[in-house]
Amino acid sequence: MNQQRTQRSRIVATAVAAALTLGMAGSVYAQNNGIAGGTTTDDSSAGNTNGGGLPQVQHQGDVAFTSGGVGSDESQALKRAESHWPLALRFTGPGSDYLADVRVQIMDTEGGKVLGTTSRGPYMLVRLHPGRYTVRASYKGHDQSKAVTIPASGTAREAFYWNIQ
């Protein structure tokens, strides 16, 4: 009788452990919005679902974006992907130095913010609906604004340059 109870307890304990493991894995999967190999806040391109070294694609509302390019692999991946994104932004400083940590806001024609984020590197790709927008970029407290028109097909490109150290 004791042996049956012990065996039953082991089976129950194993089943509970398996259920907890599956539950935790499902929770992580749900927190990552179904994205395997990284989160939408992952700072690296390692193991993400985009492949080819492209940084993790993130979303704000219906706007998708990715940024980075500090390393050469990531930089090359972003340059290769440019033609597949409606808006490509580049941020440079003196001597064509690449900049990171540029605060970016994109506003629609009515002044509504459609994107507010910080670029993780000198390149940012943004998927916007065709139309007119204002891109505001800020680096070390110095702001710039540029009007951009996103075409129905193709890519709009804008370069921001700061002559500050």
Image (cartoon, rainbow, N blue to C red):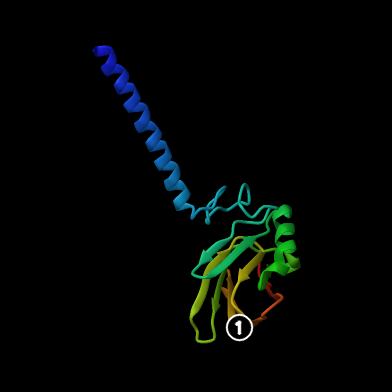
76 shown above or below 151 = above
As drawn, is 33 to the left or to the right of 100? left
Q: Can residue 93 be seen by looking at this rendering?
A: no
What x and y, as percent, mark residue 152?
A: 66, 80
Q: Can residue 104 be seen by looking at this rendering?
A: yes
Give the residue at x 64% y 55%.
50
- Of residues 153 and 10, the one nearer the viewer is 10
What x and y, as percent, mark residue 93?
A: 69, 68
What x and y, as percent, mark residue 155?
A: 70, 75
Q: Where's the C terminus, which quadrant?
A: bottom right
Location of residue 64 (image quadrant): bottom right
Give the residue at x 54% y 53%.
35
**Residue for badge 1:** 131
- Of residues 154 and 12, the one nearer the viewer is 12
What x and y, as percent, mark residue 85?
A: 67, 69
50 shown above or below 3 = below
As drawn, is 108 to the left or to the right of 75? left
